């Protein structure tokens, strides 16, 4: 009976500790089934890329890859894989049972209307971890929460926020989110002895830098003078003290056991979802010692890793029994090594004989010919047509035809080769090109040998043409691919059928770090992570059946412990009876290629978002200023690459009044651009209902507050109302740059200021409103911080002083000329340094 097929779909990438532990748990549950179950793994890699276009690409890939596959059950790990299959299961794997694990805070409503789904819930017990941490550290007055904004990270934030009221008056909470790693480390280093750190999830910082599971926790734990607690076991061992931890292994084991029930015939409908997450109290002995935490204070069923062991704890009879077993094992190993050496020598001789036999056999496909001393053809083999495109009779009738088919660039090589061979009486070979009758160019490997009689007289030449076009194309292709992925030479490894290494080239030494002497005679399992050993056994079983496996992607381990992504091609080596006697493996290190692929996908997604943001921004910014009596106006917005957060506008609520607004929304994304659109709509709705500038800012702030909080964005805004008849300017400011007002009467330059905080921080804010008189010739310049924060090559800021000098120096000019002068000044100041932020300006001049 063929083995039952099981597909495991991981949300995240190979080498991610949580995912690897899930794999170990699943493998442990299915191990007893042996060859009766064949498991295939897919890694969706959604930690690095997870936009809709990517999921559509995954759908198309799986649809093609598994179009003929039939699985008895599918195991999915974590939320993204479950969401993917709830959407695409019926299209890709119709009527196939699905078991999930590692799904955070599962809600049965997620599977409403979905059949053949069950699994195990993953719920981080934050409450238990915080309660234990405070019991172990009763003097704590502050808990600092470090967390990211991934899907699970947002759930963690919400869970912690819901617990805060229960601790009111006892401890305060500080969230370190939406920060770059250096900022987090600086904050952590300053923590006092009355603080603790709660480490939620952290895979990407504000700058977009991705951190592997061990990198973020290691950096923070090393910088923290106080204990760090958490709720996921993949951080344990890298600086986490511990806590009530969710375990990838136990999640995977539970799911594997549920899959086993289905494989044995039980219906998935009879297997309910396991809602109680299999969490355990787990701690790191080294961190307990570092912070002087008494182990007797830990819960009774706690798991403690890295606890030092001692031989004194081992019973005498067990110790001596182990010594005896070890001694016996050494003797057996020595005998096996001796037998292996004898067998390897015999296999090498057999392989050499096979190679010689194959060389003779392969030559029958070459064009073999004989030439007389005058270079006339005496014989041409039937393969002539296949190699050159010409019949043998054509060469017999026209000996010079051989010169006509040789590529013109290679003719000198041919003449020199024949001269050397006949002159030295030594056989030789070289490679050149020929032009076939259809115009295609073929590469030829030419071998020839001068023939002499017993008196030493030259009587002719024996030659052979071998078509090596495919080999040349393969060599060129391999060179191109090697340049693209910037990889080293491939690892070429020979093994016997039992998996013992028999040959090890320099490429393998470079990739894996082991020398040939270190690896010959060792099992291939030396390079294989424990969780992939079963995979290797299955692959070798296929090879022993004579199957070829190409470009199989997996993980291997270097001598220094680093994990590598490898693309492996397995080929069976057969003797003349067709029996598989050895296994050849060609391995390519594709670690850098994987990183480049993820980076390109990330960059493409980010660039497209920024392009959309710019399109949204530019569609709402007017480049046609108002034309009103007694007033000249100019405006501009120069985006920095694709940024979409600056905004300006102007209104005429009634005759003689002109409202001017300039704003800057934090962030550089589609979200910023969409909030700018919402802001514009709110302003247009509120302008005509009698609001003064201060009240209008307050109304806009209240209306946008919730959306801004959800997006974690703020808006700075300056709003001014000019009465062109009475020559007065009323204005209010929501944390924006202070505009310049140039006074024509005395040449003075003022900054217009009014109290008011950024929008989006809280509701019910009062914005101070001021009123001043203006006269003919006065100039108002409103601008965003992209102007004053432009940097030069020395990282100096353009600043308000330089800006003010330009305004004063251009006071007699039209507003458009003033803006042009400022843009020229910015370009001269910054030089070749790219602009980091948008530049927006609105200038008016009273006439």
Image: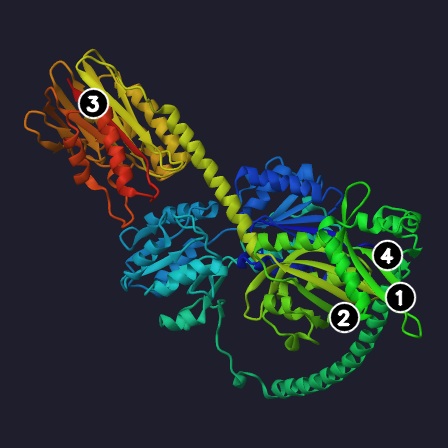
Residue marked by disc 4: 366
Which comes sooner in the sequence, label 4 or label 1?
A: 4
Which comes sooner in the sequence, label 3 or label 1?
A: 1
- Residue 572 sits in quarter: bottom right
Eyeballing the image, is 740 above or below 230? above
Q: Nearer the viewer, mark 1 or mark 2?
A: 1
Q: Nearer the viewer, mark 2 or mark 4?
A: 4
Q: Nearer the viewer, mark 4 or mark 1?
A: 4
Which comes sooner in the sequence, label 3 or label 2?
A: 2
Asked whether the residues under the numbered discs 1 and 2 touch, taking CB atoms below 8 Å apart as contact, a structural biologist would say no
Q: How crowded is the residue under tag 4: few (<14 C-alpha within 10 Å), some, or many (20+)? A: many
- The location of residue 335, given as percent across then percent down, is 76, 84
Residue marked by disc 1: 576
Which comes sooner in the sequence, label 2 or label 4?
A: 4
Q: Image point 91% across, 47% down: which residue?
A: 394
Q: Nearer the viewer, mark 4 or mark 3?
A: 4
Residue marked by disc 3: 814
Q: Image point 70% across, 44% down: which residue?
A: 65
Residue marked by disc 2: 498
Taking depth in this image into account, of 307 and 271 the one nearest to the observer is 307
Which comes sooner in the sequence, label 4 or label 3?
A: 4
């Amino acid at each position: 009976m063929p083995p039952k097929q099981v597909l495991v779909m991981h949300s995240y990438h190979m080498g991610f500790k949580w995912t690897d532990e899930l794999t170990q748990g699943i493998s442990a549950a299915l191990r007893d089934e042996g060859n009766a179950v064949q498991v295939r793994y897919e890694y969706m890699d959604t930690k690095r890329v997870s936009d809709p276009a990517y999921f559509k690409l995954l759908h198309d890939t799986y649809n093609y890859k598994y179009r003929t596959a039939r699985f008895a059950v599918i195991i999915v790990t974590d939320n993204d894989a479950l969401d993917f299959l709830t959407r695409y299961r019926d299209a890709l794997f119709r009527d196939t049972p699905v078991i999930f694990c590692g799904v955070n805070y599962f809600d049965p409503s997620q599977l409403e209307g979905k059949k053949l789904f069950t699994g195990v819930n993953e719920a981080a017990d934050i409450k238990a971890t915080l309660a234990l941490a405070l019991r172990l550290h009763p003097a704590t007055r502050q808990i600092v929460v470090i967390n990211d904004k991934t899907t699970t990270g947002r759930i963690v934030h919400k869970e912690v926020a819901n617990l805060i009221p229960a601790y009111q008056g006892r401890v305060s909470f500080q969230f370190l989110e939406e920060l770059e790693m250096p900022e987090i480390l600086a904050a952590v280093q300053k923590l006092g002895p009355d603080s603790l750190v709660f480490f939620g999830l952290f895979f990407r910082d504000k700058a977009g830098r991705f951190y592997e599971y061990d990198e973020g926790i290691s950096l923070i734990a090393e910088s923290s003078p106080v204990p760090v607690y958490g709720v996921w076991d993949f951080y344990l061992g890298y600086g986490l003290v511990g806590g009530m931890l969710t375990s990838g292994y136990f999640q995977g084991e539970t799911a594997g056991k549920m899959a086993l029930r289905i494989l044995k015939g039980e219906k998935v409908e009879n297997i309910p979802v396991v809602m109680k997450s299999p969490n355990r109290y787990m701690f790191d002995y080294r961190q307990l010692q570092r912070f002087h935490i008494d182990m007797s204070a830990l819960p009774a069923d706690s798991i403690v890793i890295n606890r030092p062991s001692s031989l004194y704890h081992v019973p005498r009879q067990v110790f001596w029994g182990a010594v005896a077993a070890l001694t016996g094992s050494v003797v057996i190993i020595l005998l096996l090594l001796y037998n292996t050496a004898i067998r390897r020598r015999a296999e090498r001789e057999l392989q050499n004989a096979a190679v010689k036999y194959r060389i003779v056999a392969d030559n029958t496909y070459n064009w073999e010919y004989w030439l007389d001393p005058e270079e006339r053809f005496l014989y041409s083999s039937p393969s002539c047509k296949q190699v050159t495109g010409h019949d043998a009779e054509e060469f017999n009738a026209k000996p010079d035809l051989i010169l006509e088919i040789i590529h013109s660039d290679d003719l000198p090589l041919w003449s020199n080769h024949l001269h050397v061979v006949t002159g030295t009486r030594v056989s030789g070979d070289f490679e050149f090109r020929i032009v076939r009758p259809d115009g295609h160019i073929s590469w030829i490997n030419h071998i020839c040998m001068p023939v002499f009689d017993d008196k030493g007289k030259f009587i002719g030449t024996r030659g052979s043409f071998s078509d090596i076009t495919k080999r040349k194309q393969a060599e060129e292709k391999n060179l191109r691919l090697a340049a693209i992925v910037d990889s080293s030479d491939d690892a070429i490894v020979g093994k016997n059928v039992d998996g013992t290494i028999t040959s090890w080239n320099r490429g393998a030494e470079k990739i894996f770090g082991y020398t040939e002497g270190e690896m010959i005679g060792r099992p291939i399992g030396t390079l294989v992570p424990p969780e992939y050993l079963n995979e290797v056994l299955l692959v070798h079983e296929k090879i022993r059946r004579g199957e070829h496996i190409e470009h199989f992607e997996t993980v291997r381990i270097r001598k220094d412990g680093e994990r590598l992504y490898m693309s492996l091609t397995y080929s069976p080596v057969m003797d003349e009876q067709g029996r598989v006697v050895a296994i050849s493996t060609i391995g390519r290190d594709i670690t850098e290629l994987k990183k480049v692929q993820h980076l390109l996908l990330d960059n493409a997604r980010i660039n497209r978002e920024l392009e959309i943001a710019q399109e949204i921004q530019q569609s709402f910014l007017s480049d046609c200023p108002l034309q009103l009596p007694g007033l000249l106006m100019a405006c501009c917005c120069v985006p920095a690459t694709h940024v979409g957060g600056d905004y300006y506008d102007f209104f005429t609520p009634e005759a003689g009044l002109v409202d001017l607004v300039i704003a800057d929304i934090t962030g550089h994304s589609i979200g910023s651009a969409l909030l700018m659109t919402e802001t514009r709509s709110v302003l247009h709705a509120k302008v005509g209902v009698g609001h003064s500038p201060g009240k209008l800012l307050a109304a806009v702030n209240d209306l946008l507050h919730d959306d801004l909080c959800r997006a974690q964005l703020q808006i700075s805004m300056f709003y001014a109302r000019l009465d062109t008849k009475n020559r007065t300017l009323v204005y209010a400011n929501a944390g924006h740059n202070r505009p310049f007002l140039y006074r024509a009467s005395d040449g003075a330059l003022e900054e217009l200021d009014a109290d008011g905080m950024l929008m989006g921080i809280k509701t019910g804010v009062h914005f101070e409103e001021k009123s001043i008189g203006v006269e003919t010739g006065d100039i108002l310049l409103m601008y965003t911080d992209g102007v004053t924060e432009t940097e030069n090559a020395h990282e100096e800021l353009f600043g308000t002083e330089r800006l003010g000098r330009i305004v004063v120096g251009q006071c007699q000019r039209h507003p458009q000329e003033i803006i042009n002068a400022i843009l020229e000044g910015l370009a001269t100041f910054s030089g070749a340094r790219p602009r980091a932020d948008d530049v927006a300006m609105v200038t008016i001049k009273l006439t």
